[in-house]
Structures are given as structure tokens and as C-alpha cells.
Amino acid sequence: MTDLTKLTLVESVKHVKEKKCSAEELVDAYVKRIEKSDKLNCFNTKDLENAVSKAKKIDTNKKLDKALVGAPIAVKDLFCTKGLKTTASSKILSNFIPTYESTVTEKLWNEDAILIGKLNSDEFAMGSSNETSSFGNVLNPYRLNNENLVPGGSSGGCASAVAADLTSATVGTDTGGSIRQPAAFTGIVGLKPTYGRCSRWGIVAFASSLDQAGPMTKDVKDAALMLDVISGYDEKDSTSANKPKSSFLNSIKSNIKGLKVGVPKEYRVDNMPKEVDDLWQEGIKILKDNGAIIKDISLPHTKYALPTYYIIAPAEASSNLARYDGVRYGFRAEGKDLTEMYENTRSKGFGAEVKRRIMIGTYVLSSGYYDAYYLKAQKVRNLIKVDFDNAYKDVDVILTPTTPTPAFKFGENTDDPIAMYLNDIFTVTANLAGLPAISLPIKYNKDGLPLALQLFGKSFDEQTLLNTAYSIEQQVNFKSQVKDWWM
Amino acid sequence: MSDKEFNYYISGETGKWEVVIGLEVHAQVSSNAKLFSTSATKFGSEPNSQVSLIDAAMPGMLPVINKFCVEQAVRTGLGLKAKINLLSVFDRKNYFYADLPQGYQISQFKHPIVGEGEVILDMPYGTKKIGIERLHLEQDAGKSLHDQDPTKTFIDLNRSGVALMEIVSKPDLRSPEEVAEYIKKLRSIMRYLGTCDGNMEEGSLRADVNVSVRKIGSKDFGTRCEIKNVNSIKFMQQAIQFEAKRQVDLLEEGKKIDQETRLFDTKKNETRQMRSKEDAHDYRYFPDPDLPPLKFDQSFVDEIKQKLPELPDDKKERLIKDYKLSSYEAGVLISDKDTSDYFEDIAKNSDVKLAINWVIGDLFAALNKIGKSIKESPISSKNLAKLIDLIKNNTISGRIAKEVFELMINDNRDPKVIVEEKGLIQESNVGELEKIIEKVLKDNTDKVAEYKSGKDKLFGFFVGSVIKESKGKANPALVNDILKKKLS
């Protein structure tokens, strides 16, 4: 019998729809794997028993016609799930059980997907290696000479879970690269949609103007299917966009003849490893072979993107995280008065990276510094948007590497926040400009680690992005080389 | 008379000081739902019974603007003859407090929904224009209850997220009296518009009072102190009096005023420091990334403008013109929309002079006595109109009318019914009156003689006796006429 966990999401759903397997069988296959995979530490919370009973119930349905019928899906532990602990991988929310369901996950369950658990991440999605989680490191299913590697972050648990076949697909969140960078590190597809494409309602907020939920999947078609389900206008989110949409999956095509692809020179950074540069050239060649027209473009403000991001994101975070004060829910450490209770709660409840960002954010918004930091960053952010607007007059998509390096070892960057922040150098621009971007695995390097390319699309043109990625995917024929060493 | 001229100055050792006052009024928007959530806003409900996930700032919750509150702010702006900003921005004002669930208040800092406007005051020394600096929308905080438990503070979030309009005046006010008039006028405008019930006891209207002093003739402003959250006109006046005096005393001692936030102790009738400038919060305002800028077009404003009710100033002018009222009478009526509505109900079809006298005379006195507003008046405008008609057509005398009025206060009965039941219809039959008069003159032959010998003042005695003999029913005008003839 085929190993059901090796199927893509599209295939899994087809299996259930065509009764090649029952939803219960599908869920069981994942449950068995999950139970043998604790070592990877992907899950903050498992919900396996409920998943099995939901699957049984779905199997009794007369019609098995929902878009995700029977698909077992674990989600990043940033999505509020009704009745199931939602921690944001933090201590301060370690005991928090929402009474409500996020819009994005609600849409999954409405299509008969089955929740199997909540996935580990960096604390409040702040990190690029999943090392800031208060529930411990997540291991990358790929290793370097038998040494463990980070899965990337912040959606590290999501990335490892998809790569290790512990979930048929997942949703992560991407504020500066938190979907794409871990996707790149684990050889999976990660799509950050256009800002406003998916509702933020019910997602623990990190930086409101940058946060966007998106699919992390085994292949491009799965990403299209997931985006079909999770996107859409939500009146509960004032920043969600009311855009008409057709099915991304049904419209997907690999013919990209005449597509204009931009290659921005500013992304050729100093000290970029040769393997990454070669990868980029390879991507250019594939696109050319597929009939695309390659154009050199300039995004002149790219070098300011990272500092801009590290002002705006912490500024918003410092305010968004003020609600975790020990008063109404979550962790509380008592004190002799209100101020001391706040101090105790927040010093003990938040980890070092979160505190660092709250402090940076508080600083850049402070009176006397606001103009020099926050306001200036907003202006630069706008210039970065204008860069893309100008580029998109000539091109349809933009091709870059996703990350400057493949997955790295634990502790490699933890002493140097700036080095860690450099992981986001190619990804943050999409968030600052609100644009869609996808990371796509291309090949393995000489050490057997996945390498990935990134495509940026025009605002609300995820279709072209998916088509381009699909066209590359068919050429490169990237196959998982995960070896189940942890079992 | 001295009150015809402005004369509120603080006399110090070194001369007279002028008091400069500006108000930041917080007016709760009349709306069934909160500014960014659909929770109810009813006053006095069970604690924490009107709290949505958004109001409690649960993780992942997002604000969605309540369109009705936006309309209310625009309506108020139009009532203040102010500039309406088609684009405004919501900012976060960040600070920690137990009854502020989000850890920030959503407010409007740099780009308010309403810009400059004005309020006209009727002072004894003439009209005075008070400038409005701006009006912006913001959320209210919850309430900390410190008196429920010896060691704990309880939090009630019913008020959390309720829409407020902060109306900031220019520093144009110069006395506690002007402040009182300003608050009353502002409240009256908002009540006419239906945008704020102005109920100060329930906290729907409260103000931060900025006070500074300067020597008469000086053009520069002194250093101001802000007295936070004063919730009655009386307290505002007391606080200003105390604070102005305090500042004058300090300055005359050669000390300087520290810009600071103070609070008014209503029991001790004094202001005291709440926090100094050094302790002032750094609110770290920045545009709320959860809310796009608030944009609407002129047609949205025009539509509201078209449906605007008549406002106090316009109404006053019209009352003077249509009913030939004095400025004072019209002023009294329009200060409260319910009063002027009540008056107009009567005056439309009945005698205007009687209507104004009865409303601002007997009715006001009676309501005052029983502590009710005109809206709760036990006598309906319809029945008071009937009473006035009975006087006008000579069915009853003014004196009887007062008796009937007293009865109506108790049960709001139709005055016609009361008059008929009690047989109070005025006696205007000359024959009947002559009979009574004959009797009175016969009983008082001595007084008649005195009158005839020149003691004219006794005429009143005869009239009174006749009225009394008729049990008040005799038509006084006829009695006069007949008596004059009989005694001549």
C-alpha cells in the first residue's frame, strides 16, 4: 500500500474524494508518523484523537466534495483555534485557550480539512531559526553530516512538519520572511500572499502592517489549492482586500512564454556563497528555456530594506504585545502593586528576542526619536514600494534567491542578532511593499541541503507567481530527500 | 450694572490677573455600539456584560470602525460650524493601565476628523465667540473598581471601547461663568443633534480644564496646568477658581508655574498635583496599522448636512421672529431642546404670551420643585395648551388656572374636565355678578361710605371681597366694571 503521507495535498484530497482511502485512513497515517516524530519537536500541541474522530465523521458524509476533504492539517501556533491551546510559542500565552477560531483556519475546517495540532515557531514569530521558541528548538529533517540544523523561522515547525510529512500542508505567517525562509531551508514551497489577501483576524499579531498568512506545502499546486481556501475578504479585518478571485488551482498553467522576468542587481550581495549565485543563474536559465524574457532591473532602495524593517516591525510589535500584561489572560507573575505585576509578568513571560524587539520598538516610537526612526522608515518603505512599482512597468515577476545561505547549525547566529536578521535580507522587501512572493525548492547543494529561489509578483497577481513557480517546478523536478533519521 | 461688563479678574498684590481657560471636553457618542466593536453601550449594566473579544483585547482581535460613530462626529462637527476633514487617521496612544486592555487607546492625533469651528455664547455682556480647535474620535477605557475588595482592584470593561468625541476649545474662555455657558451650549448643540446625551452624572460628558493666568493686558500666555477629568459644571468652576488663585499666589511670590497635570479634590475643593511634566507619559503615538486612514467624500458630509436638525442659535432667531419673544425668553427656551419643543407645541395654536409665561414661570417652578426635567413633565404640552385656551377665552380666571394647574401636576388630567367637575367656570353673567356685588356692598356699608368720602384704595378691597364671595369664579374684569358703576 502507498504511504499516504507521501501524497501531496491535492493527491490526498483526490484519494479521499475518490474513496481510494478514507479520511480516517489518511489521518491515521499521519498520526502514526507524528507519534514517531517527537524528536523533531514540530508540535506545540497535538490534537490527534479529535482528528481521528473528525475523520470518522467526515467518512460518514454522503458527499465528499469539499476542497480539502479529509486533509489532516496542523497550523502554526499563531492561529487562534477554538478550544485548543494557542501559545504563539511563548510562555506568556502558554496557557491560553481561545474561545474563537481565526478566519484563515475557519476556512480550512469549512472545507473539511482536519486539525491535527499546533506547530512550533519562534516566539511571537520573532526569529529566523525557531530558536526563540519557549518550547524548544525544532529540528530540520535535513542534516549536515549528521549534525542537526535549524529549520529556519519563524514558521520552523510548519516547515519541518511539511518536509517530514507530519501534515499534508500547513499555514504559516510571514512578517519578514517567516514562511519563505524556513520553506527554503526545508525544501518545501512557501507562499506569502499580497498583504490583505488573507484575513489577519484571529492570528496573534506581530507587526500588523506586515503580517500575512500563507500556505506552506509540498508543491506549487498544493500552494494554489491552499490559497484558494484561505484567501478572501473578511469584514472583521479592516486591512483585508475586497478583490474578486477565481480558483488559483484551476487556472494554474506552466506555459510562461513571453513572461517578463526581472533580475534585480541589488540582490547580488557581498559574500553571497557561490552556490547561491549559481542557483540564481540556473533559475534564470530555466525560465529562459521555458520561454520567459529576462530583464536586468534595479530596485535601488533594497539596501535600506532590512534596517527599515527592523524599525517598523519592532515598533508595531511593541504596541501589539502591550496587551500581554497579565491582567485578563495568559501568564501572570504577581507583584506588590500593578506596576510590579506588569514588570514581573513581562520580564518572566517574554523571551530575550521578544524583549529586544519590544525595546527597539519602544525606542523608535519615543518622543524625540519618532521622526528620526519611525517616520523616516515609513518614508523609505514607501520608496521601496515605488522601486517595485517602477520595476513592474517592465516585468511581470522578479527572481531572486530566497536566502543568502542554506540551513545553518543551532547556535550559529544566536549571539549576533544582526547576523540572524541578515537571513531576511531577500525576503523583507515583499512585506514592506505588501507584495506576494513565493519560495520554491530548486536543488540540493553538495552537502545535500535544499536551495531555493524566490519570485516576487505584482500586487494581487498570485496567479502569475504560481504559474511561474509551477513552470520552474516542472523543470527542476525537485524530490524530497528526507531520510527519516529521527524515527 | 456691573454684570453688563466682563469683570472676572483675580486681584493680587501686584494688580489684576486675567484667567485663560481652554477645555478638552470628552463627550460620549450616542450610539448603540462601540467605536470599533458591536458591543452594547448601555449605562449601568452588569459589570463586564458588554464586552466583546475586541474590547477585551484578546489575541488576534482587530478593530472595525463603526460607521454610525463617524456620522455622529461629522454631525457634531457641522453643528460646531467646523471644517470636516475628508481624510483622518487613527493613531495608537500607548500606555499601560489595568483598565486599558490593548495597552493603547485608539485615538486621532495628527489628523482629526473635525478641524476648526466655533461656539457662540450669550453672556450678560454680549455674545462671545469661542473657537474650537478640533474634534477627534477615540475609544474610552474601562473602569477600575478599587472599592470592591480590601486588596484587589476589579476591572469593568463595559466602557472599554465606547466612542468618545474629544472636543478641544481654543484658550478663549476667561471666567468660570464663560466655562459654564460654554459647556451648557456645547451640550445643548449635541443634544439637538442627538450626538451626545450630555449626561454628566453618567460620565457622558467630562472635561480636562487647562488654566493659566496672566497680567491684564499681557498678550503672552502663562504656563498652564491641566486639571484632569472634571465631571460637573460646578466642579469645573470651583477648580478654576482655586487653580487661578493658586497660580496668582505663586507668581506674586516670585515663583514660577510648573506645567503639570493636576486633579480636583471635590471634597477639599482644591487642585493638587497628579503628575509633573517629568513624569508625563510618552504615549508613543503612531498610526494604527490595523486601521486604514478614514476617508469619505464630500457627498457623505452633504447628506448628513441636509438632514441636520435646527440648531440652538438658528432656533433662537426663529423664535424671536415667529413668536415675537424677547432675546432673554428665546434664550431660556432654546437652552434645552425639549423645552423649546414643549413651548412650540403650545405656542403654535395658543396664546404666545400666556404660553411663554406659563412655561418659564409656573411650569419651571413646579418641575424644579419635584425635581423633574421637562421631558418628564407630569403636565403634557397638550393639556397645558388647553389650560391656556381656557384662560384666553375667559372660561376661567388666571387665579383659577393656578388652582387647576396644581391639580394637573398630580395627575395630568384634561383641565376642561377638572374645571367642569369642580364647577370652576368663570362667572361672567352680569346679573349674577350684580347680585354678589349688591351683597358685598350691603355687608360693608361703612366701607362704602369711606370710599365715597375719598378713600380710593378701598376699591381693591371690594374687588377682592366679590371674588372671594364668588369662590374665585367671578370674572375680575367684569367685576371691576360693575363695581365702578355701582360706586360712582
Image (cartoon, grey):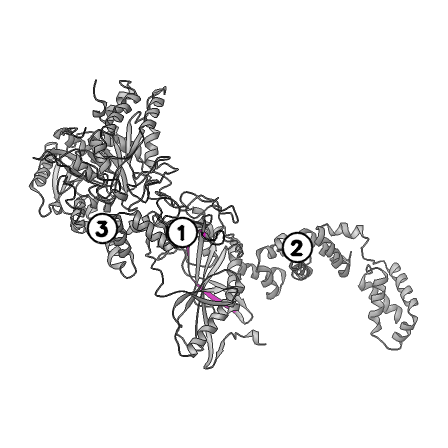
Q: Residue at x 40, y 59 (%)?
A: B115
Name the secondary structure under disc 3.
helix
For disc 1, the marked residue is B100
Q: Residue visible at 61% across and 53% down?
A: B375
**Amino acid type of disc 1?**
Leu
Q: Are the residues flagged by discs 2 and 3 in contact, CB closer than 8 Å?
A: no
Subunit of mark 1? B
Percent x, y of residue B235:
52, 64
The picture places residue A143, in percent across and down from the top left corner, at: 13, 35
- The label on residue A310 is 3
Q: Which amino acid type is shown beneath numbered disc 3?
A: Tyr
Rendered location of residue B415, percent (x, y): 74, 52
Q: Quarter of the image containing the C terminus of chain A?
A: top left
Residue B258's quadrant in the figure? Answer: bottom left
| Most foreground residue, B119 or B326 | B119
Say whether mark 1 and mark 2 are on the same chain.
yes
Do residues under tags 3 and 1 come within 8 Å of each other at their CB atoms?
no
Q: CA distance from mark 3 to mark 1?
A: 27 Å
The chain carrying label 3 is A
Q: Amino acid at mark 2?
A: Ile
Question: Disc 2 and disc 3: Cα gap in Å?
Answer: 69 Å
Magenta residues? Answer: B127-143
Badge 3 crowding class, 10 Å Cα cut-off, few under 14, some 14 to 19, many 20 or more, is some
Q: Is residue A358 above or below residue A110?
A: below
**Residue B346 disc label:** 2
